[in-house]
Image: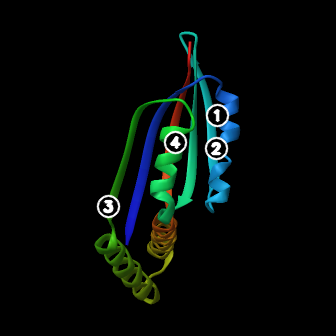
């Protein structure tokens, strides 16, 4: 199981136009997950989070590098998470197995731990399905 992140910093002429151009991810089976804007010392910036199937990592990097503006940074990081996934699954199974002997606060705590571990595993599964892309746009002066 692999997870990957792509980060890119770009200088663009128009933030809103660049945001509209991010629709390219839909054609690749992805989506825009979040958008945030900021102004600092008169400089307007935007952060856009994208989710795209891993098989399109190269295409996303290519499009961001060539179709938006001046690239000041681009990087892909990836990691293997199979060992962590197996450890989390074992931990979840152990907590579930212990439920029958618990009551009161201990039972409530175990149920909370089951919920937390289940959420972590679900998040990890989404991370293995999609490349997480964070694009920082800065409007050209």
Q: Is 96 above or below relative to 52?
A: below
What residue is rendered at 37% in x and 44% in y? 75
Q: Which residue is mark 3?
A: 79
- In the depicted view, which residue is nearer to us: 61 or 30? 61
Mark 2 packing: few (<14 Cα in 10 Å), some, or many (20+)? Answer: some
Measured in 3D between alpha carbons, the distance from the residue under mark 2 to the one under mark 1, in whole angstroms, is 7 Å
Q: Which residue is mark 1?
A: 18
Mark 4 packing: few (<14 Cα in 10 Å), some, or many (20+)? Answer: some
Quadrant where the C terminus lies? top right
Which numbered disc, 4 or 3, marks the residue that appears first in the sequence? Answer: 4
What residue is rendered at 48% in x and 40% in y? 65
Measured in 3D between alpha carbons, the distance from the residue under mark 4 to the one under mark 3, in whole angstroms, is 22 Å
Q: Quadrant of residue 36?
A: top right
Q: Which residue is mark 4?
A: 64
Which numbered disc, 3 or 2, marks the residue that appears first in the sequence? Answer: 2
Q: Which mark is residue 22?
A: 2
Which numbered disc, 1 or 4, marks the residue that appears first in the sequence? Answer: 1
Which numbered disc, 3 or 1, marks the residue that appears first in the sequence? Answer: 1
Mark 4 vs mark 3: give the one in front. Answer: 4
Q: Residue 85 in the image: x percent, y percent?
A: 36, 73
User: Is disc 3 placed on a helix, strand or loop?
Assistant: strand
Q: Residue 95 in the image: x percent, y percent?
A: 40, 80
User: Is disc 4 placed on a helix, strand or loop?
Assistant: helix
């Amino acid at each position: 199981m692999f997870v990957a992140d792509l980060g890119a910093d770009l200088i663009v002429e128009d933030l809103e136009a660049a945001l509209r151009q991010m629709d390219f991810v839909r054609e690749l089976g992805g989506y825009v997950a979040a958008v945030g804007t900021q102004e600092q010392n008169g400089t307007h910036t935007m952060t856009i989070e994208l989710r795209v199937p891993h098989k399109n990592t190269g295409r996303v990097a290519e499009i961001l590098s060539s179709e938006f503006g001046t690239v000041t940074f681009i990087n892909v990081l990836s990691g293997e998470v199979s060992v962590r996934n197996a450890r989390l699954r074992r931990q979840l199974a152990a907590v579930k197995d212990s439920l029958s002997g618990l009551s009161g606060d201990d039972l409530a705590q175990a149920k909370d731990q089951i919920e937390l571990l289940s959420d972590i595993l679900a998040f990890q599964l989404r991370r293995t399905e999609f490349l997480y892309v964070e694009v920082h746009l800065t409007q050209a002066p």
